Amino acid sequence: MDLAVTVVALVAAVIVIAGTARRLGAPAPLLLIVAGIVASYLPFISVPDLSPEVVLVGLLPPLLYAAAVRTSLVDFRANTSAILALSVGLVLFTAAGVGLVTWWLLPVPFAVAFALGAVVAPPDAVAASAVARRIGLPRRVVTILEGESLVNDATALVALRTAILGFTGAGAVSFGVMTFDFGRAVVVGVGVGVLVAFLIGLVRRHLDDAVLDTSLSFVVPYVAYLPAEHLQGSGVLAVVVAGLLLGHKSPVVQTASSRLSERINWTSVQFLLEHLVFLLLGLQMRRIVGDVAQSGLGWWRVAGISLAIFMAMALLRPLYIFPVRWLEHRLRRVDSGDRRALAHNAIISWAAMRGVVTLAAALSLPPDPQTPYRSILVWVAMFVTVASLLVQGTTLPLLARVLHVRGPDPREDALQEATILQASVAAGIAALESCDQSDPGVIETLRSRAENRTNIVWERLGQGREGAETPSETYRRMRLIMLQAERAELLRIRDAGVVDQEVLTHVMDQLDIEESMLDRIEDRTSDLRDEPMLPPERTEDECEHLAAHHDRFVAPTSPHGCEECLRDGTTWVHLRLCLDCGHVGCCDSSPQRHATAHFQESAHPVMRSFEPGESWRWCFVDEQLG
């Protein structure tokens, strides 16, 4: 009963505090740690023991898998050099630097000091993702930070294991031994991860049940982690590699329903575990403070040591990143003095929040007397974690604003989404036309539905006519009215008890799925229209028609609206301008589609958006966005 009450209380606290943080726009990890610290001093709170095994074996594998399976393998490969430089080189550089500072401040062997450096060296995957999602950073910066935090735990734990062998006398430690240990951890970890991904992929090809497939995904992190650790490899790398590969292959080896089910379930699991670890972290404060009080060192000295190590950790990161990134840019022949590159380096340097793995690694240090001043080392790990979240986590948004570092433009995303969706729809229509189908009505219905999917995305762009709905907005509003009436009728039938519950549930599920899709489209549309207009930008892979019309200016023949719609008294949704003759026509979401009709009549290849502030262009011939 005590365990059940504790679990329920922890989950309830996570939901309340995380929900409050979202409403206030505050960092949830920091609020959870503060709440945990306060709760640890309340006499009626039973504080659960946060053992290293609970974190490193119980919580870390699913957290890493949840992040890895949603990480783009393509983006990870494109930034491999930067990720490895941070997750391997920076971790060892920080461990050595912090080790020297600790060795100077505390009367401990250097192996012990290096162990503390390995403990505090890796930024936390959960904290990095949480902050990046909250403030909005460029995708390449987010990929580098998340990739670093996925892999750096492996480097830090191998370095920690080697250091412990050194100061406990369990084995000889040298650079060669450490290199061999690290190489074995990488080879075994990556090998196990690839093997697990391959085997799970084979199993999934024969699973068409979403429940079974999702249940299988819950054991994947442990199937990868435990064998790798048993073989003295890196369980962290095994989980990350398995997650990356399975996420990349999921469209091939999983059904659509399995992918949706897994994504929804893992989103809930990830939310609870991510926030739970920070609450558990704060709950350890009272116990750690009590151990420090018995260490014999005065609190002023302990505070000075803690602050010095935190400052060393914060300074070592930019001291490493700026030269290494400069060298990387030189090798790639990229301008390393570009303001944007320097700003991104500054953001990466300051985004170094530590998390629960740091404390778990500190708690894994052998007890006294094998680890001199162990209570101080654990306290420093706790202090560094809280201070990094408090100082760097709260000031990172301000730094991003000062440096004018912004996340991806939602309107540019919408343009790219419309372009790739149009390309995929065109492939689908081509496949449809090649089918042996004698019913023209079915073909026309499928063609119309496919084109409507593309038009919905295009309609999200532009301001449209003031007070006028787009066709998709009208459809959504009227369909929601229908769904409400249909659900009310279903509830009446259910309460009458004349139809089997399982049949009613199946019909109700269909309504819920359709309504959730309509709600998602509405949210994305409203969020998009709050964004500023798109600036003009030349892309490097423009077709010959777009390149020829890039800087062309042409006066509109009908500046107040679609020429044919004004003549015929019809309405339009968005306007398009022909860059050859200045004809203004309506988009394909409009009933008459005069812009496309003008291209078919005149063969003028390029049109431009005639919406206020927009400058994107479209080539009808090559179906390419410019």
Image (cartoon, helix red, strand yellow):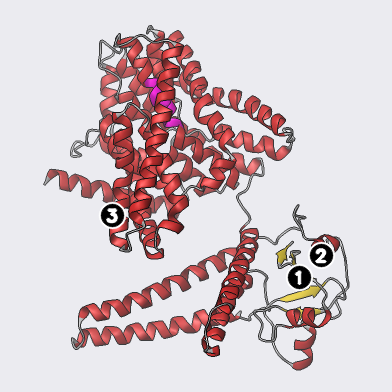
Mark 1 is surrounded, within 10 Å at the Cα level, by few (under 14), some (14 to 19) or many (20 or more) other residues, namely few
Nearer-the-camera pick, 465 or 416: 416
Mark 3 is surrounded, within 10 Å at the Cα level, by few (under 14), some (14 to 19) or many (20 or more) other residues, namely few
Residue 81, given in percent of the width and then of the height, sits at: 58, 33
Pointers 1 and 2 in contact (C-beta within 8 Å): yes
Pointers 2 and 3 in contact (C-beta within 8 Å): no
Nearer-the-camera pick, 206 or 586: 206
Kindly identify which residue carries mark 3.
215
Helix, strand or loop at disc 1? loop
Left or right position of 437 against 455:
left
Per the image, is 157 magenta? yes
From the viewer's perspective, is residue 322 above or below residue 494?
Answer: above
Query: Which label was assigned to residue 194?
Result: none
From the viewer's perspective, is residue 518 above or below residue 352?
Answer: below
Mark 2 is surrounded, within 10 Å at the Cα level, by few (under 14), some (14 to 19) or many (20 or more) other residues, namely some
Residue 503, given in percent of the width and then of the height, sits at: 25, 81
Left or right position of 270 against 132:
left
Residue 537, given in percent of the width and then of the height, sits at: 76, 55
Q: Residue at x 38, y 26 (%)?
A: 157
Q: What is the distance, in whole Å, between disc 2 and disc 3 at their CAs? A: 51 Å
